[in-house]
Image (cartoon, rainbow, N blue to C red):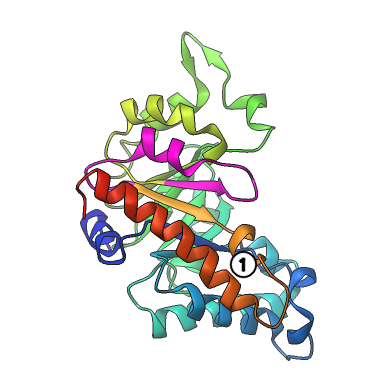
Amino acid sequence: MNHLQLFEEIVKKRSFLCVGLDSEIDKIPLSLKQNDNQVFEFNRRIIDATAQYAVAYKPNVAFYESEGSKGWLSLESTVKYIKEKYPDIFIIADAKRGDIGNTSKMYAKAFLENMPFDAVTVAPYMGEDSVTPFLSYSGKWVVLLALTSNKGADDFQYHNEDGIRLFERVLSVSRKWGTIDNLMYVVGATRASMIREIRQIVPEHFLLVPGLGAQGGSLSEVVKYGLTNKCGLLVNSSRAIIFADNSENFDKVAAEKAREVQLEMEGYLRDRNLI
């Protein structure tokens, strides 16, 4: 899937919603606890309930790895289910990998070859040779960490040297490694006002924007600074959708929450004459 094809899916669904599958086992409704693969069953019901409103899903790999081989099986089953039933939906492995070249090559193989993810989040700290193995897969994407939403982002990402902040250097250097068809950037929704400056460096690249909902990010602010003539945004919401309810009807409530976000997104797309 390239930049234009992703935009076409956004237009089709009138949405740029990414649902984060941060499926923490302790928060799964009691009604699923007796299921042999309760995480996958939870994900399956969330996916079926929200697929009409979402253009992407983003499983956070940590929530699966923490459960050992059983968790990894849940992750594989989840990705396979999405690809088989909803093949046009974009799937991001939120894995935040990045290591020396040979190691990154193995990480890339794990997520982009052995599992049918469309993209994987990558940390840029070790430089170009730690990122290029992920970019070697045709039709796949790197989602590079640029400016994150956590408090600790202030420790390094705003470090200013010779008038250039670290996150700005990450953007200006890394944009040469890929194209708008295989490279997008993570920018936290709680840093929405910074998107205006980010757009001066990467005006056309897609931005993956987490932090909507439970983390307090503002969709209107993200759109104000980040929307392009090809949308250029995937805005992620995790807990506010998937854990909105813990009753037997959790999937129906998740659908309602996703629909609310989709309707707001549709309004912004109409305002900009993108649909």
- Left or right of 178 on screen, residue 151: right
Q: Quadrant of the N terminus?
A: bottom left
In the figure, residue 113 lies in which quadrant? bottom left
**Element assignment for label 1:** helix
Question: Residue at 40% across / 85% down in the picture?
Answer: 84
Question: Residue at 51% across / 39% down in the picture?
Answer: 124
Q: Amino acid at mark 1?
A: Ile
Residue 214: say if magenta: yes
Q: Quadrant of the C terminus?
A: bottom left
The foreground one among 194 and 137 is: 194
Q: Residue furthest top?
A: 162
Q: Is residue 182 above or below residue 106?
A: above
Question: Residue at 69% across / 87% down in the picture?
Answer: 37
Residue at the disc numbered 1:
242
How packed mark 1 is, by other alpha carbons closer than 10 Å (few <14, some 14-19, many 20 or more), is: many
Q: Which contiguous range is marked in magenta? A: 208-232
Q: Is residue 149 above or below residue 28?
A: above
Residue 191: say if magenta: no
